[in-house]
Image (cartoon, coloured by chain):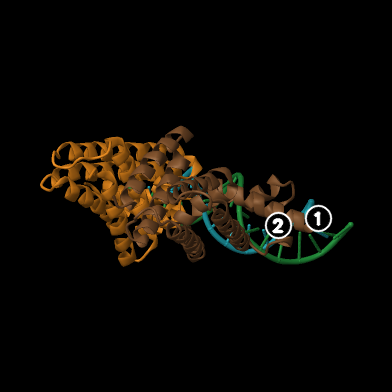
Chain colours: A orange, B brown, C green, D cyan
Amino acid sequence: MNKGEKTKQKILDNALVLFSTKGYEATSLKDIASSIEIKAPSIYAHFSSKEVLFEKVTEYVKTDYIEFIRKQAVDLHLFSSKEMLYELLVELNKYFYNTDLGLFIKKFGFVPPEKFKVLLNNMYAETEREIEKLLYTILEGDSKERFVDKQSIVTSFLCILDGTLFYLMNFPYEEYERRLNRTWEVFWNGIVIK
Amino acid sequence: MNKGEKTKQKILDNALVLFSTKGYEATSLKDIASSIEIKAPSIYAHFSSKEVLFEKVTEYVKTDYIEFIRKQAVDLHLFSSKEMLYELLVELNKYFYNTDLGLFIKKFGFVPPEKFKVLLNNMYAETEREIEKLLYTILEGDSKERFVDKQSIVTSFLCILDGTLFYLMNFPYEEYERRLNRTWEVFWNGIVIK
DNA sequence: GTCTATATAACGATAGAC
DNA sequence: GTCTATCGTTATATAGAC
């Protein structure tokens, strides 16, 4: 990676963080530029406008997130379906907690600015499909448990993922963990047929 | 209500809608003013700054939402606990779907701008407490069903409320309904002890 | 590829007439 | 209480030197 590409990547990284914390409108190109110690007009050597920059950040985030989900399919194959579902929920939450990219998805994926609504809804839909595929694999690999229909499991899993993410972002970690585990128990209890 | 108060209320109403759809930064005082056919500086006769205006809108929304939740306690007392929980979930979703105030909570309650984070988190916490009280009343009024512990029910109810709200805002109504019902079934199945 | 200088527009907010 | 005129600031974006 040469110097130009390095700068471009630094712009993407810092734009990601600033957009996520301050919001799109509240983040100026000067904010982004000064965070990597260049001047605002230099950004235009790499991106043709602020809008395009935001779109490129979105692409970057989507690629990374989908890659992460696919990686889970490999990492999780050793456990029982119960353990796998729980681990998947926790790992997804961790991804959102630990990475700047998670913060971006949390901020813009759920309540997108009007300007980028189509773009961001497409991103969400794609990641949802990836998680759905992964859930199907987990559920089909289990012959011990009897489950309610798969569609209900996928839908409610995605639903509690959104809910726990909200807890993760807005409560101290301990409170989040308590809430995650309570919600998980109701979910697991709700999807198995006894 | 005299003319001055009427204008003040119109500013609040229109600011609510514009903030919710465009976001705080992307909404200018001129946008708000021209939507009620006055000029931007006239707003300062009613509110001392844009920040204060946003805070007043937040207060207005909180008051209305909490009143709505309390009203549910009266409206819902005729059904079984299963019907009441389901109706409550649906009614809360409807509130968010049908009113401008719901859009505001959806936009700013879940991912607040840094500037108003404390204010909005307090609003969320207060509404959460109200829903919790209501859930306790519903669950304690039932002697037929056996439930898992109440805390788990409250937490997972709030969790799926957040999740279904996301579905409501980002999918066509029919898809939302399908997802709501699937999630509800897993939830109910998960909180009763068979 | 980064800089300085600048164009152009919009913002929040104030002053003062009516 | 609403207006016009305006201040001071900041934004995105461009031009052109190096």
Left or right: residue A21 versus residue A189 is right
Give how far across and how far down residue B186 sits, in percent.
33, 44
Residue at 25 percent across and 54 percent down: it is A90
Picture quarter with the N terminus of chain B = bottom right
Mark drawn on residue B142: none
Graded by Cα atoms within 10 Å as few (under 14), some (14 to 19) or many (20 or more), the crowding at tag 1 reads few
Instruction: Name the one closer to the observer, B194 or B45.
Output: B194
**Lower position in the chain sequence, tag 2 or tag 1:** 1
Identify the secondary structure beneath mark 2: helix
Q: Residues within 10 Å of mark 2 (few under 14, many from 20)?
A: many
Chain of the residue on which disc 2 is drawn: B
User: Residue visible at 29% across and 62% down?
Assistant: A177
Kind of residue indicated by mark 2? Ile
Vertical order, B119 against A75 (above or below)? below
The reply to whether residue A26 is visible in this rendering is no
Disc 1 marks which amino acid?
Answer: Lys
Residue placed most toward the observer, B40 or A3? B40
Whether residue B38 is visible here, answered yes or no, is yes
Which residue is found at the position 19% from the left and 45% from the top?
A: A72
* Residue A127: % across, % down: 31, 40
Q: CA distance from mark 2 to mark 1?
A: 14 Å
Furthest-left residue in this view = A78
Placement of A45 over or under B4, stated as above or below: above
Q: How many marks?
A: 2
From the image, tell me which residue sits under label 2: B43
Q: Which mark is residue B3?
A: 1
Q: Residue furthest front?
A: B144
Q: Position of residue A100 (x, y in %)?
A: 32, 55
Q: Position of residue A76 (x, y in %)?
A: 15, 47
